[in-house]
Amino acid sequence: MQWKDFFYFSHGERRALTLLLFILTFTWILLSYPDFFSKEKQVTAETEITPDTIMGPSVPEKIRIQRQAVNKTVTPTGNTTAKYNSSTGFPKQEKFPAGTVIELNSADTTLLKKIPGIGSAFANRIIKYRNLLGGFYSVEQLAEVYGIDEERFLKLKPWFYVDKEKILLIDLNQATEEELRAHPYINYRQAGAIVRLRKQKGTIHWENLLLLEEFSEYDKERLYWYILTVY
């Protein structure tokens, strides 16, 4: 008998050995992890398998949850009231009632958007133009904001008043040429004329500006409200 005969097995013997190995492996698992099958059974028994368990909340349920989250605003008393717009799926923007009037030079975008006819785009444009000017001296200046045509302006006008005390004034003797040009009512040529006049006289006042040919009567009328030293 040769040594390789010890490793020869018949078909029946191989099946018996395979079964024996399976039994040994299963026994080893039971001895090593006694709680494995009991825990798995417990989880299966306690967990109710539903479509939401497998896939998460359905689309209508997600929408309901989201709406509950955004459909509330905090009132001054701390209570919550629904402000949901059912047609769009977004929080509803509150608008002021007719007859409300707000101060144009201090209103922020949140306040501006409460005016009928003003959304985020126009609110941002109004704030940007107001910053460039230094403030509005008249509600009429709203018509200068990009996109506000005559029809829209006439609808917006009754909602505002201006406090001229809030205007940021230009100091003709301190402002740089770049700062002067940044003002909507002063162009490149006019800014240069102011700087040259300042170099000649050392100190200039509003009355000196009136003599510059670069400024028309209309220019002087508009700039009057923005010059620090007015004489």
Image (cartoon, grey):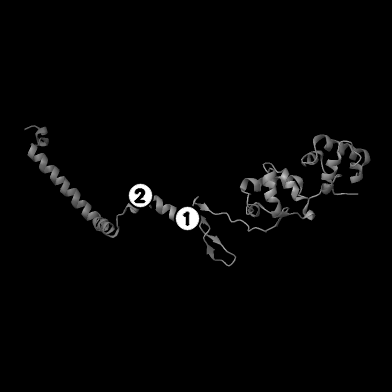
Mark 2 to mark 1: distance in Å?
20 Å
Q: Mark 1 sits on what residue?
A: 67
Question: Looking at the image, which residue is at 77% across and 54% down?
Answer: 166
Q: Which residue lies most toward the right here?
A: 201
The answer to which quarter of the image holds residue 34 is bottom left
Disc 2 crowd rating (10 Å Cα; few below 14, some 14-19, many 20+) is few
Q: Which of marks 2 and 1 is nearer the N terminus?
A: 2
Element assignment for label 2: helix
Question: Looking at the image, which residue is at 57% across and 64% down?
Answer: 75
Above/below status of 87 relative to 189? below
- Residue 212, percent from left and from top: 90, 38
Q: Which amino acid does label 1 sit on?
A: Arg
Number of numbered discs overlaid on the protein picture: 2
Which mark, by number, is residue 55? 2
Residue 222 seen from this side: yes
Question: Looking at the image, which residue is at 68% across and 45% down?
Answer: 151
Residue 106 seen from this side: no
Q: In this view, does 184 lie to the left or right of 59?
A: right
Q: Which amino acid does label 2 sit on?
A: Met
Question: Looking at the image, which residue is at 75% across and 48% down?
Answer: 140
Above/below status of 32 relative to 151? below
